[in-house]
Image (spheres, helix red, strand yellow):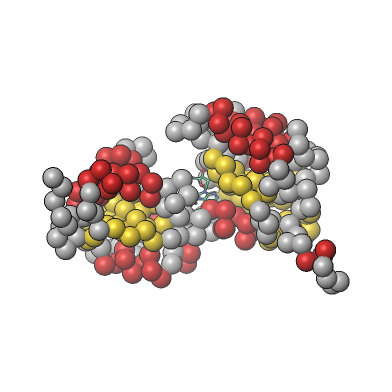
């Protein structure tokens, strides 16, 4: 039988895309109130100034299952925050932690939302996602490649704006070219594309280009990059991307 929680609580906290300015007030509050903060080194560094007096448990990339189990276990008797970059629901720790908690039963938990990479990247590009969009991760570590390809085709064919998370990693170089190849089968060469690297943190860079030219930037795309492909109505303007919401169909301006 699972134990019932005593005074413990588990927060699953989205800490935003980079700068502490983009950490929500609520996230900051629960991090300060926590007895333990658990996360991988990069994310712990991101909030180091906020959690000066808290017990920190750092773990490497990978090891997510152990990290989630440890957080659930500690939260029986302690206030614990397990952190995710951006938002914990967007390819973050929320899913795994709730799956572990579901098995353990009776865990008191709360998920705290954060600014996700697509919001940060879209803001830097102006207004690229002001209509229906699909978000697709190109990481085939946990999702079969065939399913990623199927989703890319469906999104491209349905004229969704497409945001690509995890476009590349050091060991996974090819999926980005594959994705652009699929999208080009359904879209014109002048379809706008935004490339945002390190949004809101050191090394930030923003490129607004087109589907026909995006592979010229192939070498710059890495695991810190989010790529946004506009829809067939999107247009480039002053190094930015505008996707109309549809007001032009109803109003004169
Ligand atoms: N939970 C995170 C996403 C984790 S997946 C979130 O909500 O943002 C990791 C991917 O997110 C990266 O490969 C990259 O595509 C994107 N990403 C995260 N932070 C970013 C940033 N500051 N700038 C650009 N892309 C970022």
- Image quadrant holding the C terminus, namely bottom right
Residue drawn at 79 percent across, 58 percent down:
237
Q: In which quarter of the image is residue 221?
A: top right
- Could you tell me residue 48's position as x and y percent? 34, 59
Q: In which quarter of the image is residue 180?
A: top right
Q: Which of 127 and 247 is in front in this view?
A: 247
The residue positioned farthest toward the front in the image shown: 1
As drawn, 211 above or below 45: above
Q: Can residue 182 be seen in this view?
A: yes
As drawn, 81 above or below 210: below
Q: Nearer the viewer, residue 18 or 181?
A: 181
- Could you tell me residue 103's position as x and y percent? 25, 43
Q: In this view, does 7 lie to the left or right of 20?
A: left
Q: Nearer the viewer, residue 110 or 139?
A: 110
As drawn, 198 above or below 177: below
Residue drawn at 68 percent across, 57 percent down:
131
- Could you tell me residue 90's position as x and y percent? 47, 49
Q: Can residue 209 be seen in this view?
A: no
Residue drawn at 83 percent across, 63 percent down:
249
The residue positioned farthest toward the right in the image shown: 252
- Image quadrant holding the N terminus, namely top left
Q: Is residue 36 left or right of residue 234?
A: left
Q: Is residue 70 left or right of residue 112?
A: left
Q: Is residue 205 left or right of residue 211?
A: left
As drawn, 172 above or below 19: above
Residue drawn at 66 percent across, 41 percent down:
155
């Amino acid at each position: 039988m699972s134990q019932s929680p005593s005074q413990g609580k588990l927060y699953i906290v989205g800490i935003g895309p980079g700068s502490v300015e983009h950490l929500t007030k609520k996230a900051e509050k629960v991090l300060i109130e926590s007895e333990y903060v658990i996360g991988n080194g990069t994310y712990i560094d991101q909030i180091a100034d906020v959690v000066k007096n808290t017990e920190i448990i750092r773990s490497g990339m990978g090891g997510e299952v152990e990290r989630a189990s440890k957080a659930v276990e500690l939260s029986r008797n302690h206030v614990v925050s397990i952190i995710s970059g951006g938002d914990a629901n967007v390819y973050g720790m929320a899913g795994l932690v709730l799956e572990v908690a579901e098995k353990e039963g009776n865990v008191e938990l709360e998920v705290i939302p954060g600014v996700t990479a697509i919001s940060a990247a879209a803001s830097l590009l102006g207004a690229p996602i002001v209509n229906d969009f699909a978000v697709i991760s190109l990481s085939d570590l946990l999702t079969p490649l065939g399913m990623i390809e199927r989703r890319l085709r469906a999104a491209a064919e349905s004229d969704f704006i497409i945001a690509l998370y995890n476009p590349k990693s050091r060991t996974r170089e090819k999926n980005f070219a594959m994705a652009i190849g699929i999208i080009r089968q359904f879209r014109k060469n002048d379809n706008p594309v935004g490339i945002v690297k390190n949004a809101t943190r050191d090394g930030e860079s923003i490129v607004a280009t087109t589907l026909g030219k995006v592979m010229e930037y192939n070498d710059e795309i890495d695991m810190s990059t989010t790529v946004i492909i506009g829809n067939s109505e999107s247009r480039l303007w002053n190094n930015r991307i505008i996707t109309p919401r549809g007001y032009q169909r109803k109003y004169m301006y």
